[in-house]
Image (spheres, rainbow, N blue to C red):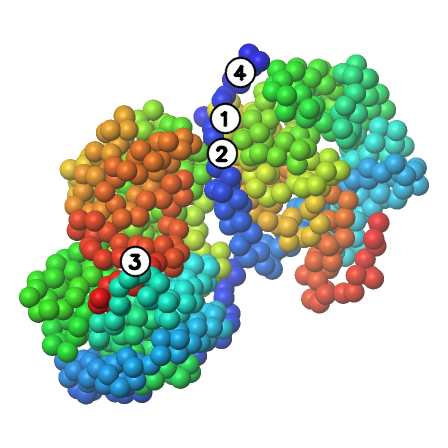
Amino acid sequence: MSDLNFGSAFDYAPAPETTPVSMRKKYELFIDGKFVPPKAGKYFQSVNPATGKRHARIANGDAGDVDAAVKSARRAYEKVWGPMAPAERGKYLFRIARIVQEKSRELAIIESIDGGKPIKESRDVDLPLVAAHFFYYAGWADKLEYAFPGRTPKPVGVAGQIIPWNFPLLMAAWKIAPALACGNTVVLKPAETTSVTAMHLAEIFQEAGLPDGVVNIVTGAGETGNALVEHPGIDKIAFTGSTAVGKRIAKSVAASGKRLTLELGGKAANLVFEDAPIEQAVEGVINGIYFNQGHVCCAGSRLLIQESIHDEFVARLERRIETLRVGDPLDKNTDIGAINSKAQLGRITELVGSGIDEGATLHEPGCSLPEEGFWFKPSFFTGVTSSHRIAREEIFGPVLSVLTFRTPAEAIARANDTCYGLSAGIWTDKGSKIFAMADQLKAGVIWANTFNKFDPTSPFGGFKESGFGREGGLQGLAPYLKF
Amino acid sequence: MSFTLNFPVPAVDQVGVDERASQFTKRSIKNEAKRVGLKMAVSMMDLTTLEGADSKGKVSYLCRKARRPMAERYECPPCAAICVYPNQVAHAVAELEGSGIPVASVATGFPSGQYPLEIRLADVRDAVNSGAAEIDMVISRGAFLEGEYGRVSDEIAAVKEACGESHLKVIFETGELQTYDNVRLVSQLAIEAGADFIKTSTGKVSPAATLPVTLLLVETVRDHFLATGKKVGVKPAGGIRTAKEALQYLVMVKETIGDDWLTPELFRFGASSLLGDVELQLAKLVDGNYQSSDYFSKG
């Protein structure tokens, strides 16, 4: 059988991003508007996942540092930010958004160095969305009464926010922008492996003249986050991360009076019907699972394909993964960058091993991987059953599980056969089918004939073990307000 | 209206096609890749003049340009073909003798195709008899939009027969067919009717070639190849004016259908003004700096 030849007739030369950036060797905590060393004087190493080498020391904040940050946030809330006219708060947010835009290339490069994501994505997706979120919520700051007609919205107080490593700056923006727009102050804890860009964001807050203590950033690992969650001076916890940690946080804040929103894991189904625009569905499935190396909570990690087109679709996926370019995150032609950390690579490898053990068939491209750093080939499994671990557990890596269905009813049953409910995708040329399916899918975000589309005006959040509360849009204001 | 394709075409989602096409424009083509790509683009170029004012002198001028586009030291390959109106074919063939560069002729009442079939076929035979090695026909867009797919198909088959040994390129004028579903359908229809090449546009209607439309042509050719093993060529024509755009098309071909189509046998650019910018970029790679456009011939 004749097949395509993806060879080297027109090889792309290396095209690394060369804009100089001002990364530091050491990053301190950001408390009360100043960069301060951690009280205990401890630091941990941040690693460039594309090389596996250490590239910066990050302050390891402990309970004492968290306490200082919370007190600073409380002061700022009571004395400055809370009493400030809402329109004035909005001006600060607009200013932050503009500075983010001005510095977006530098921030994108640092994001790629620190986290391993391809520059193509940090430049074209992450950073534009970061600015868009600040712009969007800046606009709401003085219009909250219009968002909730007939009610009197008031800020909640001090928000403790814990964010993940997959979209470090974007998640910071998702959390900080609505909190500030609603008049709250913030203590943010970035993920341990991706703390660097949050500290550059802190510099932007300084440059924007944001009053001291309105945003405080305490870097550290799980213990630091724990100290933040348990601190009695916190009024609200917003967490994005794993379901296991989310459950622990929920237990910890129970009966404390603290408000809580959780945005946790997912195992999203991409439903492809035989009447779908096949070529575009292939692209959507590829984007759904390999975007950001699959480190996406709403990744379309289960492909549910109508049995009649299974073989053809799998053949198309096999050809398509041959053309994905895996490698240096700073190369503008890289499609798939490095796995964020050694630990994450271990989890992916373990789950993929379980898939093979349980009898599924692994499909990999012929590409080679860099020798240093953390890498995984963009892959997919066929012959997957709903009971397989790779169909139930979140792999959080570039690995897709392909399952089949025969009828729309079976598609719904299989799609909803999961403890998660964050997102889903529907691929069909028939509009009525899109609505019929979307009505029955238990997922917070449903895309039709596209995937992984984000916009600050659109709410995002999950069902079941994917969490509760919404971020983005008008709905994203509510968790930061009391009425 | 009882027309059926041997290989039915899938639905096309316009937003998805446009998005995919824009991804190809994000590739960064530098240094050696750019040099290879630019030379490839010249070697795939159907250097074209299709004006009422075309004279022997103009055609001679173009033929000399196709033989040697740039000074020796740039190591620029000759163009793929010359594309002219039927009346200029004999003259172009004489001018290009010994060069190995074929002459392509537009025919079938180009650009509208709004003539009786017999006249269009006579047009083709005349061009072939004058020495045209390649025939660029236009389909009856009117018939296609009327839903007379069978008639469009039969006409292509008739032209193919009239072509004899000459290669047949079928022009769709996608700017008039408009929808991506139409583009995908007409591509498959033309391939099944015997096209050796499928081509986007005449260059007389705007929009002419676009990246998303050409992507649809390439995908159709790819799927047909995978189903049957038959290789059909693709020619975007009109509207491609810069070296950067040409490289984006090559990126699209490379990543959609693979290396086998990165050859003038299976991929062509129909262009009259593209060569100038490609020359400028190629000279920059060789000489190390951009030169004034005054240093490059305009014709």
Amino acid on which disc 4 is placed = Thr
Q: Give the spatial CA distance, label 4 vs label 1.
A: 11 Å
Residue B54 percent location from the top left of the image: 89, 38
Question: Quick check: marks 3 and 2 in contact, CB under 8 Å?
Answer: no
Amino acid on which disc 2 is placed = Val
Kindly identify which residue carries mark 2.
B12
Q: Give the spatial CA distance, label 3 vs label 2.
A: 34 Å
| Residue mark closest to the camera, 1 vs 2 | 2
Kindly identify which residue carries mark 3.
A475
Earlier along the polypeptide chain: callout 4 or callout 2?
4
Q: Residue furthest top?
A: B2
Callout 3: residue from which chain?
A
Kindly identify which residue carries mark 1.
B9
Q: Give the spatial CA distance, label 4 vs label 3.
A: 50 Å
Give the vertical position of A270 relative to A42 (above or below).
above
Q: Give the spatial CA distance, label 3 vs label 1.
A: 42 Å
- Looking at the rendering, which quadrant does residue A198 occupy? bottom left
Quarter of the figure with the N terminus of chain A: top left
**Dot 1 lies on which element?**
loop
A389 left or right of B92 in image: left
Labels 4 and 3 in the same subunit:
no
Kindly identify which residue carries mark 4.
B4
Question: Quick check: marks 1 and 2 in contact, CB under 8 Å?
Answer: yes
Callout 1: residue from which chain?
B
**Dot 4 lies on which element?**
loop
